[in-house]
Image (cartoon, rainbow, N blue to C red):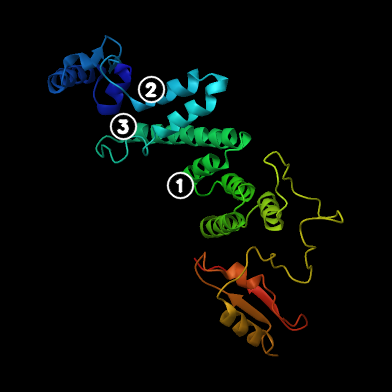
Amino acid sequence: MPREQLCYLFWPDQPDATARRSLAHLLTHLRRALPTPDLLTASNDQVGLNSAWAWADTTDFERLIATAAPRDRAVALRQAAGLVRGPFLAGFSLPDRPEFDQWATQERQLWERRFLETLAALVEQHTARGDYSAAIDAAQRYLAVDELAEEIHRRLIQLHALSGDRGAALRQFERCSITLDRELGVSPLPETRAVYEAALAGTLRSEKEVLSVPDETAPNTQYPVPDTQYSIPTAPTPLIGREQDLAVICALLRREDVRLLTLSGPGGQGKRGLASRRPAWSPASALIGRHLLR
């Protein structure tokens, strides 16, 4: 790293000459503390680690990504992803040096993005080779870092279905729906629902199958024609263990004095699932409204 940058990160309020002297003093103490002074390299302009004595995961990561031959791409990506054990400089900060903490945050975000790009590439590599198990593992590592990545949820639904585990595919869609509702207050995109519907119907047979959103005006669309009488989403997943709640809703909606029923509560408790069942409602006298309390 340039000496100038190090001086700014650690002594931003000191004059340049004073900061450079402070850095030189610190490097002297650092050489004495290291197992061998040759671990550190320093010139008039830069300070670094001697690659003959020191190993850095970030350097190895960059090398693997940059030098991998096309035929060895999957192996290099897997090795690079295996180097990542957590966020960059996890748990380390200098509260009295905001410039350093800002730099560390930017580096953390940069390496997280590189890691996720690597995992996404691995998912595609393994999928193209038909190694669905490895692709699923890479996609799950991705979601462990960024659970709001709907495109990865969508890919996992497809991968589970292609590997013959339709139950896992449906659970993945449910997890995606709950996460998006809880964190963003939105529903899955039509593209995601299209993959879910195909998995539910058992029509996913090839990783190369184009899973585009069907034309809802076409006669054989995968989507049911929406009921324009109600602005309620189609039921996303089977409803289990809510029979008593459904009975209460039915009873309330059959009462003549009930015109609006609001389902409220924290995100992720199944309000959308209940509202989407439409059990024996009287269309002339009842509506269901959905209201989220956060």
Q: Is residue 191 left or right of residue 147?
A: right
Q: Position of residue 14 (x, y in %)?
A: 23, 24
**Disc 1 to disc 2, C-alpha distance:** 24 Å
Residue plotted at (49% across, 68% down): 266
**Which label number is shown at residue 71?**
none
Question: Measured along the vertical axis of the image, is residue 147 above or below residue 48?
Answer: below
- Image quadrant assignment for residue 123: top right
- Give the mark nearer the N terminus: 1 vs 2: 2
Q: Residue furthest front?
A: 164
* Label 1 sits on residue: 144
**Disc 1 to disc 3, C-alpha distance:** 27 Å
- Image quadrant assignment for residue 222: bottom right
Quarter that holds the N terminus: top left
Q: Position of residue 101 (x, y in %)?
A: 32, 35
Q: Are marks 3 and 2 in contact (CB under 8 Å)?
A: no
> Label 1 is placed on what type of residue?
Ala
Q: Position of residue 63 (x, y in %)?
A: 43, 20
Along the line of sight, the residue nearer the viewer: 166 or 266: 166
* Label 2 sits on residue: 59
* Label 3 sits on residue: 100
**Disc 3 to disc 2, C-alpha distance:** 20 Å
Q: Are marks 1 and 3 in contact (CB under 8 Å)?
A: no
Question: Measured along the vertical axis of the image, is residue 142 above or below residue 33?
Answer: below
Q: Foreground mark, 3 or 2?
A: 2
> Label 3 is placed on what type of residue?
Phe
Secondary structure under tag 1 reads helix
